[in-house]
Amino acid sequence: MTLVSDENPLQPPWLNAPPVDPYPFEESHDLRVGPKLHPALDGLLPYIGLWRGRGKGGFPTIEDFDYAQEIRISHDGRPFLHYESRAWILDEQSQPVRPAGREVGWWRPVLVDGRATDELEALLSTPSGVMELHLGKRTGTQVEFATDAVVRTATAKEVTGGHRLFGIVEGALLYAQEMAAMGHPLSAHLSARLVRVGG
């Protein structure tokens, strides 16, 4: 790609500009530091933090498995949460075997006239080629999501839907996830209990 030529003698303003400093805005999973929490996120405040724990997985097409997981839910002062999850398979002695699922995305409260409702949107993406749009609702410290749309790459497994239930119970983050995939209807897939280790 040629940026400057006889046909295009103008140089883009960034071509010879000096380097930029690192990203200058804070993002935090710890409410004691970083930007002020956006008021639209007040109802989701209990979820903000760094969480770690273990769970059980399975599906009709695979054997059950044990896993560990770390979830980081953070904010940068705007009206959405950044959600990042990484998991790893555990053996019978609770030792790590291999990396497992990863997911990144955003939880967004639905705003009406600038104020948050109990309705939520979640956009989640995996390195396995699946992107999901979830619609949901917050009830107290419980969040429930159901898939509204799934987009897959040509090489991704056939995932067609999902349902997730999150809750803060006695200070811990609990969730259960169902998945529809590979010709099977919604079936139990993952469930875990994570404790706050940061934030």
Image (cartoon, rainbow, N blue to C red):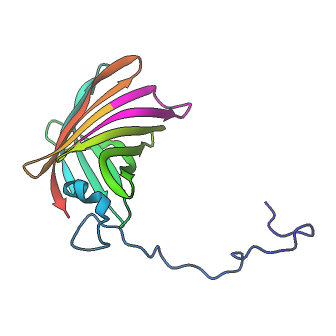
State the image coordinates of residue 46 (x, y, percent, origin top left).
Answer: 19, 56
Q: Main secondary structure of the magenta part?
A: strand
The quadrant of the picture occupied by the C terminus is bottom left
State the image coordinates of residue 40 (x, y, percent, origin top left).
Answer: 31, 59
Q: Residue furthest left?
A: 170
**168 sits left or right of 2 in the view:** left
State the image coordinates of residue 176 (x, y, percent, origin top left).
Answer: 22, 35
Residue at position x 32%, y 72% from top? 35
Figure check: 176 above or below 142: above
Span shown in magenta: 143-162
State the image coordinates of residue 77 (x, y, percent, origin top left).
Answer: 35, 67
> What number of labels is visible?
0
Q: Residue furthest right?
A: 6
Q: Residue furthest bottom?
A: 18
Q: Between residues 155 and 166, which one lies in front from this camera angle?
A: 166
Residue at position x 7%, y 49% from top? 170
**Is residue 9 magenta-colored?**
no
**151 sits left or right of 50 in the view:** right
Q: Quadrant of residue 34?
A: bottom left
Residue at position x 30%, y 19% from top? 60
**Is residue 158 magenta-colored?**
yes
Q: Between residues 34 and 23, which one lies in front from this camera angle?
A: 34
**64 sits left or right of 93 in the view:** right
Q: Quadrant of residue 31?
A: bottom left
Residue at position x 28%, y 56% from top? 72
Q: Is residue 66 visible?
A: no
The quadrant of the picture occupied by the N terminus is bottom right
Q: Between residues 63 and 194, which one lies in front from this camera angle?
A: 194
